[in-house]
Image (cartoon, helix red, strand yellow):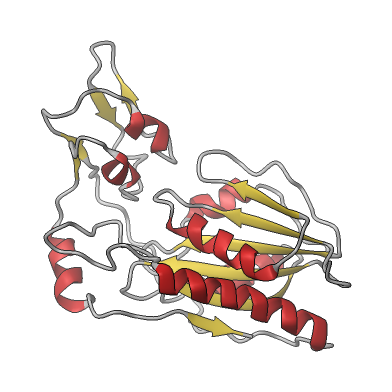
Amino acid sequence: MNSIINSVNLIYYSPTGTSRKIARAVGDGLKVNNLTESDITLDNNNIKSFPNDSLTVFVSPVYGGRIPSIFFERLGTLNGNGAMCVVVVVYGNRHYDDALLELKNEMTNRGFRVSAAASFIGEHSFSRENMPVAAGRPDFYDLGMAEHFGKEVMDRITTVPDFGDLFVPGNYPYKEVKPKQPAAPISTEDCCSCGLCVSSCPTHAISLDASGNVCTDIYKCTLCCACVKVCPQGARIFDTPFTKFLYDNFRERKNPEFYF
């Protein structure tokens, strides 16, 4: 066990599973025995603080160049009390804009010492089979890079006496969060009312009525499209012209970035 870090905590919000994959790969690279996971996708985090000799890895998706507000809400009153942390964002191959800076600043304000940061790429929520945007990512290369990042983090913690203030890209004030359009994925006639979309929705915006029809609260929906990706019938769809825009302008592969 590392002489400075005696435990590692992975905390992630991952409606479509991409952030979870990155978090676990980073955890593999850290190579510690005492590792815990807190998946805050569906429920709030119940931990209030961590010991000073712990390292917490926060992993969040990026929505419109920002950290989704629900990520911070789900963390509750969590405070770092001077413990170290690593911040990681996963974006859909367009850009993470101010998200990494936002996550770093929030964790600093919560009492953590941010020792490293990274950005990774995950399949965009709006990616479609005929217009793929980062389809299948994080892939084998991405996960290998995430594991390597974890190893680099631990190596630096054991060899660098003082991290100083970590630089990450971004601007403050942050990119404006534009009002969400009242829209949501819909279910087609192929829907079998299996309920997987209901159980996968992080904001609990989907339900089944008495007749087994899928109902969606468009004001609760964050357009993460977890329901689209989990549907075994392919009966959950979300068509938006933004998919073509992403495909036309952002399908060239982007690579992970590390900041120490």
Say which quadrant the C terminus sits in: bottom right
Is 42 left, or right, of 228 in this rendering? right
Which residue is at a point 34% across and 45% down the rendered structure image? 226
Q: Residue furthest right?
A: 3
Residue 164: x %, y % from top left: 75, 87
111 sits to left or right of 180 = right
Q: Quadrant of residue 121?
A: bottom left
40 or 6, which is in the foreground?
A: 6
Query: Residue 258 in the image: x percent, y percent?
Result: 54, 83
Q: Position of residue 182 (x, y in %)?
A: 24, 45
Q: Is residue 249 left or right of residue 27?
A: left
Toward which corner of the image does residue 86 lie, by quadrant? bottom right
Task: Using the image, determine if residue 15 lies above or below residue 111.
Answer: above
Is 70 on the left or on the right of 193, as rendered? Answer: right
The answer to whether residue 5 is above or below residue 163 is: above
User: Is residue 144 visible to the viewer in this orientation of the structure?
Assistant: yes
Task: Give the quadrant of residue 136.
Answer: bottom left
- Identify whether 170 is placed above or below 222: below
Which residue is painted at 29% across and 79% down in the image?
Answer: 253
Spot occupied by residue 8 in the image (x, y as percentages of width and height) = 74, 60
Could you tell me how many numbered marks the image carries?
Answer: 0
Residue lying at 66% horizontally and 84% vertically, measured from the top left: 166
